[in-house]
Image: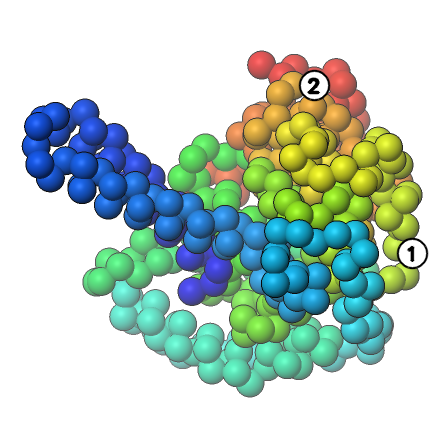
Amino acid sequence: MTNFTKLEKLKEALASTEKNLEWQKQSLIEDNPDRDKLIQKLEKVAEDLKEKINRFESNNIEEQKEEIIADKVSDEKAKISKKTVSKKTAKLEPVINDSDRNFLNVGEKPDFEDGVKGLKQKLKRQKQLTAKYSKNILDGDVITTENYQPNLDKHIIELKNVRKSYITGDLETPVLKGIDIILDKGDFIVILGPSGSGKTTFLNIISGLDKASEGDVFILGSNLTLLKDSHLTKFRRRNVGFIFQQYNLLTNLTAKENAEVGENLSSNKENAMSIEDIFTTIGMAEQMNKYPHQMSGGQQQRVSIARALAKNPNILFADEPTGALDEEMGRKVLEILVKVNREYKTTIVVVTHNPNIAKIANTVINIKNGLIDSLEHNDTPADPRTIDWS
């Protein structure tokens, strides 16, 4: 189970605990001798869950972030000054030329049974192929299980027959039910869909936070379906940046130091923007030395964008980046994302419940019932300042 899956489970447990706590407070008789003990116990459980969630939300920025900033955390932890921020950087990765990448088809499939038993057989085969080919994929080999060869020059995301199911006892719950899609490099992509449609699972799979049960997930030519967890972490570190609805800033670091965490994670220094250029881009050059508690929610979200950009990613994933912001701050965040996409050719992928945000994209994906309901291309994306926010 990945940290991201654990985080979702913790949030579910917290919601259940808080609901139970509220019910107990309303329903228990005042003179019940066990009332205070029960409420205290539930409050303690809720506090413990909140602490775990905070820890996992920080880890979701990058699962290996602690390794790089370990020397920044002193025994006092809450008293890190700017002078303690290390300039330690990630090891530079070798550049992989597309012309040098080997292609291999391992798509001969045995006959699988139906239902949960068949799904377990598929997952067992996937595990065997992962053990055999994961390192090769990380080193640049293009390996398919679906007899499919991606176009490395033009496309950045290519999915072929992608399915995702969960097993609960003897029950299989399909979430993604066979997705085929091709997305171009440099696109601004918006993913729409109602709750339960599978859009979050889709985002998790194409960003390497989760793995498909079946099919090819080619991101920059690497088939994420056949990468083991440790290699998925390395792939994310090399290639992708994340912006979450919850800003996940390190509260004891300044805005600049938070961005430097992303910079330290970068293994791709070619054509990277400087920290100063990034803060100019997001309109916060004067706030670089402020701490998160000294900033508004919109400013904190912009710092989270700065941290992601400092990593110099090929793809920037944003999960509801305006969900916790008012209209004015939300528009500013979208303006920054559009600017980054147009000026630096960074591929942007945004998941949102707001269909109006789709107007600023040049590619819009609608997901419904675990399938691609529609894929639309927009030759004249709107300016974020002009879209309806209601």
Q: By what rule are the colours in the image chosen?
A: rainbow
Q: Does any portion of residue 206 appear in the rendered image?
A: no
Q: Quadrant of the N terminus?
A: bottom left
**Which numbered disc, 1 or 2, marks the residue that appears first in the sequence?**
1
Q: How far, Cα to Cα, is label 1 from label 2?
A: 31 Å
Position of 85 relative to 125 (above/below):
above
- Residue shown at 61% from the left, 73% from the top: 231
User: Is residue 369 found left or right of 334 in the rendered image?
Assistant: left
User: Is residue 283 found left or right of 371 in the rendered image?
Assistant: right
Categorize mark 2 by other alpha carbons within 10 Å: few (<14), some (14-19), many (20+): few
Categorize mark 1 by other alpha carbons within 10 Å: few (<14), some (14-19), many (20+): few
Judged by depth in the image, the label closer to the viewer, 1 or 2, is 2
Q: Does any portion of residue 110 appear in the rendered image?
A: yes
Q: Which residue is mark 1?
A: 271
Nearest to the observer: residue 357 or residue 39: 39
Nearest to the observer: residue 35 or residue 341: 35
Q: Which residue is mark 2?
A: 328
- Residue shown at 64% from the left, 81% from the top: 135
- Residue shown at 82% from the left, 76% from the top: 94
Q: Secondary structure at mark 2?
A: helix
